[in-house]
Image (tube, rainbow, N blue to C red):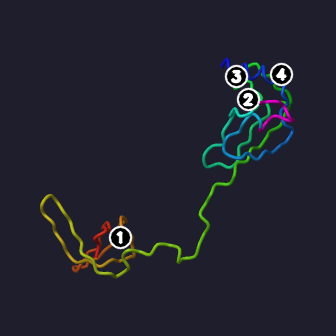
Amino acid sequence: MIALAVMAAAIGGAPVVLTDRASIAVSGRAIRLRDVVAGRYALGAAGAIEIARIPAGAVRLTLSRRMIATIVRRMVPGLTVTGANAGTIEFRAPPIARRAPGNASDLPKPAIARGEAMTFAVRVGPVTVERPVAAMQPGRVGRRVFVRDTAGNVFSARLSETAR
């Protein structure tokens, strides 16, 4: 707390003015003091203070200028903030990285094809019961698929690495 008061004194005791911009693009999810201050104040280390954060999963956060001034005063006691007139500032984070859609050849091939013959095995203690089944749908290791046994019964089974 004392360090923040020293930072406020280091700014020179002059009031800082909030930016007049209505929209600000930030480099990450953190909104820092230097993002909301207008002009070229000698903020020094105080400029790196995180005053707010854009929530995970969101790419925008809108705050009123009065709320920003209140947050700044709480984060840096002794700092005087002006320019907190009516209005809001929208902060924009970089877009969330998403995998670009590719073609179907990029997708992993199913481990089991529809209609493929497999052996269904159930283990309970030292006893293992096995019976032949056929896959009713394609599937991958670790996932469940519907299978049909020789009697025509349909049930789901988890595919193991030794499936087939």
Q: What type is the residue that disc 3 sits on?
A: Leu
Residue 39 among those drawn in magenta: yes
Q: What type is the residue that disc 2 sits on?
A: Ala
Residue 84 among those drawn in magenta: no
Tag 3 near tag 1, CB within 8 Å: no
Q: Which callout, 3 or 1, points at the residue further toward the start of the chain?
A: 3
Q: Quadrant of the N terminus?
A: top right
- Does the rendering let one see residue 14? yes
Tag 4 near tag 3, CB within 8 Å: no
Residue holding disc 1: 145
Residue holding disc 4: 12
Residue holding disc 3: 4
Residue at point 73%, 45% (across, down) = 26
Q: What type is the residue that disc 1 sits on?
A: Val
Give the Cα separation between the discs numbered 3 and 2: 8 Å
- Does the rendering let one see residue 156? no
Which mark, residue 154? none
Residue at point 63%, 43% (across, down) = 55
Q: Is residue 24 left or right of residue 133?
A: right
Q: Position of residue 9 (x, y in %)?
A: 78, 19
